[in-house]
Amino acid sequence: MNSITSPQLAAMLVISDIFALVCYNGGLSAYTAVGLVSGIALQYVMVMPLVKAADKGKTLPKAVKLLLVSGLVLWGGALLGGLWKAADITFVPYENAGGFPGKLEITAMVAAVSLYVAYEGTKAAARSSLIAAFTGVIFLLTDLISGMRPSNFGNIPAAAQFGTFMDGLRLSFLGGGNLITFIALLPCVKGRKIKAASLYFLCRGILSAAVVMTAVLVTGGIMDTADFPVIMSAQLSQPFSSQRIDALFLILFAVFGVFALTVQVMTAAFLAGEIFSRFRRWRCTAAIALTLLAMGMFTGCTSTGQVSNKSYVRCVGTDGKSVTLSFFSDERIITADGEDISSALAAAEIKAGRPVVTGFTELIILGNCNRKAVLEDMLKEWKVSPSCMVMYSGDPVSVINNTDPSLLEGRLKEAVRQGKAPVCDIITVLGNMQE
């Protein structure tokens, strides 16, 4: 393996750490951030004996290298598993492209690109990782600054119940598989190894804290509904007009996923070549294959073949007891009744003959109902996107049946842009109802 510099090592590893945080689907708080940084500092102290040994030119025994290969494969599988789970809210379900086939397609593409980059060698991956990391830092700063509005600081105490110091400490270790990668790559670093270690752990600590606090500032008030708080914070705080997560975040998410997997595959292949000197030609291919198998262990995706059989709601109209649903695909519009919107949705699923997914809903049309209660239920129970738009109508059923949803959304966005209508995402609308 070619030699790498300290900044290149830090960039390669931090990308994986941040990607793991983006795919984290638990509660976060300021206490979590403190625990996470404390765990990172503790890991820094723990690796010092290995760093000093590497500075003296000592090499790792083959048995240790074999354990590292196993760890790299498992960590790569965990990262792919995070990608698989996060795909439910990051990939657009247009024309039935979502569900199992869509997630499988994206995962396969990430694996294929990672394999290609790994075959190109360490030098190419190390240099390009600096560019990717720099772009990610710019995005994170934009996200953080955008979320640091005075009104958001009240979200810090609001999120305190959703994450503890110990949660952060556990996250630093359970989500810190890069410690294995760090140990494996350390002998390849030019110059003093302690400098590389200090730079990596410092960058990891600062950026991890920034990611967590951005999520807390933006989503602290609705942390109980945020399955992926970092992704939701990117969705809410970016200063770009978007109806879900904007294209920049999606690009960075994919790029970071590729780099995160590439580093694990490339390092595992390199160590395997050192352990088994005759095994060189198909090292990267074998590493990616084992990583995909490991992903199956973390996600159980091999047994979810029916999950693609879902209907994705694009637009919903309701009067509090009945719902009218319009879908992304060419399915017929469904109207169902119930005692409340939850039972009405259950009735709609029976009519559709398949599960109905509401998390991608782009437009809610409210009729005569308790609007605040309905919107709170849709945000907490239906898990609609926080950027989902809301409008009022005396006859939601007629509006949905007689108007194309994309036309409705386009007109509403244009009216908001021109100042002819107020900002109408569900979070803003609910916030105005509280005042």
Image (cartoon, helix red, strand yellow):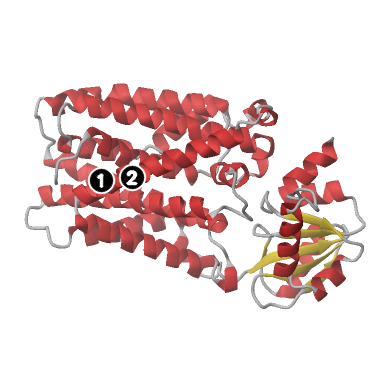
Q: Quadrant of the C terminus?
A: top right
The quarter of the displayed image where residue 353 is located: bottom right
Name which residue type carries label 1: Arg
Would you call the spot at circle 1 few (<14 residues within 10 Å), some (14-19), or many (20 or more)?
some
Image quarter of residue 30: top right
Where residue 372 appears, x then y in whole percent? Answer: 84, 46
For numbered disc 2, what is the local secondary structure?
helix
Q: In the image, what residue occupies the spot 49% across and 31% down? A: 210
Q: x, y percentage for residue 305?
A: 50, 69
- Residue 273 in sight here: yes
C-beta proximity under 8 Å, tags 2 and 1 = yes
Residue 411: % across, % down: 75, 63
Residue positioned 64% across, 74% down in the render: 329
Say if 163 sits above or below 97 in the image: above
- In front of the other: 245 or 298: 245
70 to the left or right of 220: left
* Disc 1: which residue: 127
The type of residue carrying mark 2 is Ile
Q: Residue furthest front?
A: 418
Nearest the eye: 48 or 3: 3
Q: Which residue is mark 2?
A: 131
Give the CA separation, mark 2 to mark 1.
7 Å
Please state which of residues 294 and 30 is positioned toward the viewer in this rendering.
30
- At 26% from the left and 38% from the top, the residue drawn is 9
Question: Image height check: is 72 above or below 118?
Answer: above
Please say whether residue 381 is visible from this viewpoint.
Answer: no
Please, is residue 52 above or below residue 392 in the view?
above
Q: Position of residue 281 (x, y in %)?
A: 13, 62
